[in-house]
Amino acid sequence: MQKRIALKVNGRPVQIEIDIRESLLDVLRDRLQFTGVKQGCSVGECGACTVLIDGVPVNSCIYLAAWADGKSVTTVEGIAQDGRLSPVQEAFVEEGAIQCGFCTPGLVLSTTALVESGKRFTHDEVRRELSGHLCRCTGYQKIIDAAERALREAEAASE
Amino acid sequence: MFDICELHEPGTLEEAKAILAENPGLKVIAGGTDVLIRLQHGSLAGAGLLSLKNLHALEEIVMLGDGTISVGAMAPFTTIFQSGLIRRHVPVLCEAAVSMGGPQVRNVATIGGNICNGAVSADSASTLFALDALLKLETSTDERIIPMGDFYAGPGKVNLRPGELLTAVLIPREGYEGMGGHYIKYAMRKAMDIATLGVAVVCKVREDRFVDLRIGLGVAAPVPIRCFEAEAYAKGKEVTPEVVQEIARLAVKPAKARTSWRASKDYREHLIEVLAQRAVAEAVKRGGGCCAD
Ligand SMILES: Cc1cc2nc3c(=O)[nH]c(=O)nc-3n(C[C@H](O)[C@H](O)[C@H](O)COP(=O)(O)OP(=O)(O)OC[C@H]3O[C@@H](n4cnc5c(N)ncnc54)[C@H](O)[C@@H]3O)c2cc1C
Ligand code: FES
Ligand code: FES
């Protein structure tokens, strides 16, 4: 069964005929070539496929593509502006929070959602809010450092 | 790709009930964090889905005229965790909500799906059971409201009649008012893990005596259970470390713990006693008492 959906991906309107059996991950990666959306476990455990749907982090592997109709989706490709890394991306680079990079797109998106919420987070809350991502390389410390740096800098910039 | 043959996406509850009445074989999908995993694993193959995703009215969390707190079946756990109303009146439900899955899962997983999935490990179940919550179930022609305890029929089995949808979880005023509560989820990891044991306690303490105490346990038997003997024992008793210990000892009684790869029977029973004691002590502090430990 086909369904025509209209959504925004990284701010650009997209109309596409999807198969109702497809996940949002399938459509973003295989049809629209947003390969920054990574496929890890396919069952909601690893967070590699995280995208923002109307600003909210969601595992795209367990989200029907049909549900994205009318939504605004952000992938990691939409984070840099005019060829410049976002402050969150800069923080990941500065803190050395990236090794193989497979988990990075998801973590950058979750961290971006935290920054854009404008809220303050304690150390434990940052750890909790990033707990839906697995990283096989870094041991997490530098990722948490990067997220806290990005949050600190955003707060300083808003004052 | 998910092995499904059709997808219905009604925009209103009335429409959803009508579609389900005509096609009782459809599989209901809410957040999909159980259904899509099962499809991914090859069960439910060939299913037709009825998606409740567009029923935004079922995401509402409100207090009704009589003080009942109504949590819409489609409310995601993040919404529950962030709800000012829940935080003010039923903070123990916030605790349970934020203990489940990880952020991305909580952003889509609904409380209705958690209950209807029937898993004994469902993190909201033991807490809602301890709160004396009621479930509102609707078909295109009928509506019934039943206690949580009547809903669970066995491991992974719930008493949903053909054509029936869970529309709201109702927490009556007597269930939460003046009660302190605490939920302890015991698991191997602090996040993204299924409970080895879940202990939910709510209690009211006045002048150092238990006025009311309710204990819900998850993963202690094939379905979530209440510890009625421990609850009855507590009523009217002075809050002392000995009484709390006896409550915890009695809490083990209704358990039908079994050995699985997660934990042995003996270990589970030990956990129930130790964690019930801790949860009661903390709930007492939050419920107006001070000298439980
Ligand atoms: C990575 C991961 C981690 C998880 N961790 C936890 C955890 O820590 N604790 C926990 O408790 N669960 C956990 N879960 C399981 C799952 O997320 C929850 O059970 C969740 O609440 C299910 O809600 P849903 O809206 O996604 O349900 P769905 O998958 O959409 O539906 C679940 C079941 O309920 C039925 N259903 C849903 N809504 C209704 C309704 N309104 N009326 C009638 N029937 C309905 C469906 O037909 C289906 O049988 C996890 C899942 C994943 C993928
Ligand atoms: S690929 Fe989606 S969570 Fe792992
Ligand atoms: S950097 Fe390799 S998985 Fe995280």
Image (cartoon, rainbow, N blue to C red):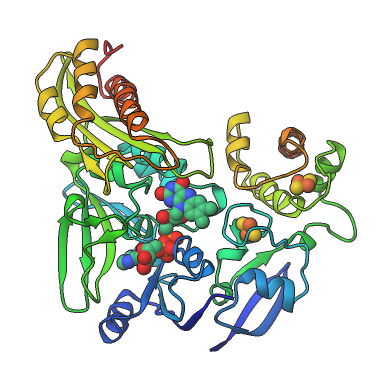
Residue B36 vs residue A83: left or right? left
Q: Quadrant of residue B182?
A: top left
From the viewer's side, name the closer residue of B120 and A85: B120
Residue B106 showing in the rendered view:
no
Q: Quadrant of ligand 1?
A: bottom left
Q: Nearer the viewer, residue A93 or B38?
A: B38
Expressed as whole percent of the image width and height from the top left, the position of residue B6 reads 46, 85
Residue B30: x and y, percent? 42, 66
Residue at the location (41% across, 38% down)? B196
The quarter of the rendered structure image containing the N terminus of chain B is: bottom right
Q: Is residue B212 left or right of residue B192?
A: left
Q: Residue at x 63, y 29 (%)?
A: A123
Q: Which is nearer the eye, A72 or A36?
A: A36
**What percent of the width, then of the height, locates residue B263?**
41, 36
The image position of residue A39, as x and y in percent, is 69, 62
Note whether A11 is above or below B24 in the view shown: above
Residue B210 shows up from this direction: yes
Q: Residue at x 38, y 45 (%)?
A: B123
Residue B70 is left or right of residue B59, and the answer is left
